[in-house]
Amino acid sequence: MSRARQPPLVTGISPNEGAAWTKVTIRGENLGTGPADLIGLSICGHNCLLTAEWMSASKIVCRVGPAKDDKGEIIVTTKSGGHGTSTVSFKLLKPDKIGILDASAVWVDEMNYYDMRTDRNKGISPLSLRPSNPLGIEIDKGKIPQKDMELTFPGMSGDFTSENFSATWYLIENHSGTSFEHLRMAASNLKKQATKKNEGSLAYVKGGLSTFFEAQDALAAIHQRLESDGTERVEGSMTQRLENILNRASDTADTLFQEVLGRKDKADSTRNALNVLQRFKFLFNLPLYIERNIQKGDYDVVINDYEKAKSLFGNTEVPVFKKVYAEVETRIGALRSLLLEKLLQTPSTLHDQKRYIRYLSDLHAPGDPAWQCIYAQHKWILQLMQNCREEFINDQRVGVGAIALDLEGDTRPLALSRLSHTASLKRGGSLRTPRPSTWRFETPQQVQFVEKLSDVVIGQLPNFWKLWISYVNGSLFSETGEKSGQVEKSKKNARQRQNDFKKMIEELTHRLVKLVRGALLPTTLPPVEMSLYAGWENKTELTGPWLTQVIHIVRGCHDALSTLEIPNDLLQVIQDLLLDLRVHCLMVTLLHTTEDVKRLAEKEDWVVDNEGITSLPSQFEQCMVQMLQSLKEPLETRPGEINVLQLEQAQDQASELCVAILKVFINCLEQLSTKTDGDIDTSHKSADLGSPDRFSSAQEDFSPTPEQRLLIILSNCHYLEKHTFLNLADHFEKHGFTGTEKITRVSAEAVRDLDGKLFDAYIERRADPIAGSLEPGICAGYFDWRDCQTPTGVRNYLKEALVNIITVHAEVFTVSKELVPRVLSKIVESVAEEMSRLMQCVSSFSKNGALQARLELCALRDAIASYLNGESNASFKLALDALPQLHSGADKKLLEELLNKFKSSMQLQLTCFQPSNVQPVKR
């Protein structure tokens, strides 16, 4: 069996360092049995098998490839020995890059050069490439602005490849902080570079000595051969004959290949032209590329290509290049016009506006595109606002039918519930909130107009303001905030146009305010502006809830503009509008509440509760509380706003209207007290005032009597004075109303006046019949005080009078227990006065007559003792003093017995006159 071969071993390489494609000789052991046995060769990790030439088992010749590693081993792989090893290494040298201005004895492939002076990677002409650091020392960039350098060195340049190169400019710009020693080193480097260039030709000769030696040897051999023949000077010699042969061969070749050579020359010319087209195809294809990219909207690509072409061929003198570049400029001019048209086109987003402005700036468009865009946006927003008004004024909106709030129905709670949806507006929030599907058909056109107008302002003005801010700080041209000529120019232009832009914002805010005033407060506009902004006379008059929603919308608009940090002086006109709207809302709400209160009389159902009052005071209080709640948002004082109730004029008007509302309600009560049965709506269910179960039972088709109506209204007046007005005063104070004391005082006085009128009317209706029945009752049956029988009891007329008083008591008690003492005291006073008058009119009494009169007076006095007052007691005293005194004990005893008999017989009836311990149930 044959012994297995050892793996390859590399022991030497010559040379052991070099650049890529250097020819090397590899020596070692077991390097293969033949070319077919060599299956792998790598140097520094690069496969060199393709260039390998197997010489022997100990020698291989190859070329080093462009490996990634700078230094590595030489590994040989064979079929017979496998993967080998190496005891030596090869160092791959990176060749120095040959500059475009450096001489070279070999061909240098062209490569993509990049100009690092700008922020774009643009291809530049190789002729414009130059060393990045010609002085060979560290560059120290100065901070002197480019404009100052241009002013200091007019017509010069710091670019050392320029014809107008200034060495001083270059040193100031790149080595302003370099020390003198370093500058001396830089001068030395320059000298070395110059020396190197001068010695360049000698270096090329040294590098090609072998070629020169070979040529010299060949020439010397030829010369020696000619000298040995001795025919170099003989005519007809070999060289002469050779020359003649060569000349004839040349002539024959010219004759034979004239056409071929002509075609070759033409082909060479075509090839050269194609080479030029291929080499500068970027420029020749640029017009077509610009057209295609414009159609696709790739404006960035167009601008980059244009900048590249401008840097390469902007100053070219080659006619064909100038012609093509002129076509490029024509296309770019059309692009400028297109971008300007898109920039001024409305509507457009802020992002698109900024993008088009940057494009136009990069294309060096004439004028100031940013300001042109701002001016166009300003005019467009104004037109949008005016169109919004015209659209509503001319009723162009489809399906819009405005209706007023029905104060008698359930529309107001619906409106209030809708208003609850529009809560506080947060930053960046929207005014639009979810609404019922019927909202647009219920909402008055003025409210829809204000909301749409506010949407226009909130939707357009923020972007308009942001565009101006970007224009001021230069971010239109540089997202990163880098300083450049465009940024500085933008800031300078913005400073010059600050007043113009301020006037634009003022015009927009004034237009907004005037349009809203024309729709809601036309009387606040000057006469000359009425035709421009008014014209809403035939529209629905807004009520308080709708005005509240308008205030909410305008406040949201103001808040949205405030978040943009627009100066407050520019928004003050909106604050003034808000103040007028709040005052107007307050007055309109109070006036409409007056109309609501007037209609409360129609809702009186005469159903009394356990305190003797109907639902009318509660409805009135509820109406007033709802009014104050609806005024909560308009009266709310937000930052920067004025308290409406602190304005003297508004405060006085509000107080007068509040007093008027209370007086209107009191007038309603007075009207209810004077209504006849025919004027009263009997469709309501009313409680049976005579029923014992008066709190739960109800009788249909019941109409209170005029006297009962007076009692009910008296009870309501009492409740108003003691409870309702005090509660309303608290509500007024909670909501910031001033002058509540005056409102309460005036209202209480009006209620007391009404109470007195109604009370006197009731007493007149009830006391006069009772007092008038006494005299006929006394004289009934031809009774005579001077001639009468012994008393047997109280006569019927007195019992009748007591029953009538009990009837009044029951009537009053049925309505209000609290009115009983007041009414009965007045009734008793009237009866006592009449009895006193009658007794004093009797000329003389018999003994029995005196006893009868004293019995009846004492019986009446004792029965109604609980309701006697000073005037009643005085009247009874006068009546008793007019009677003869009782001297007989029997008479006194008889009087006492008869009194006891009377009280016993009428105990049930007289029970109502006893003080009751039952307290009314509190509501």
Image (cartoon, rainbow, N blue to C red):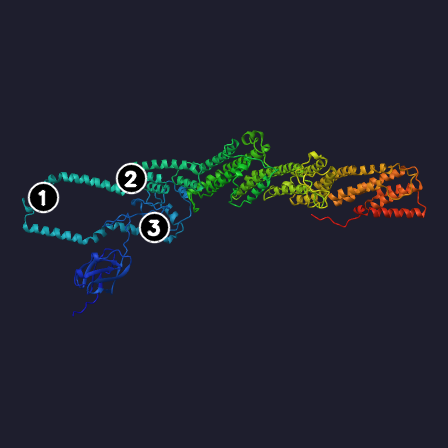
Percent across and percent down for residue 817 are: 75, 45
Mark carried by residue 246? 1
Q: Which three-letter amino acid code belongs to the residue tagged 1?
A: Leu
- At a point 16% along the width and 38% down the height, the residue shown is 262
Residue 64 to residue 726: above or below: below
| Distance Cα–Cα, label 3 vs label 2 | 33 Å
The quarter of the picture where residue 280 lies is top left
Q: Is residue 549 left or right of residue 360?
A: right
Q: Which residue is at the far bottom?
A: 1
Mark carried by residue 284? 2
Q: Earlier in the sequence, mark 3 or mark 2?
A: 3
Alpha-carbon neighbours of circle 2 within 10 Å: few (<14), some, or many (≥20)?
some
Q: Nearer the viewer, mark 3 or mark 2?
A: 2
Query: Is residue 653 in sight in this rendering?
Result: no
Q: Which three-letter amino acid code belongs to the residue tagged 2?
A: Phe
Which residue is under mark 3? 133
Percent across and percent down for residue 450 are: 54, 37
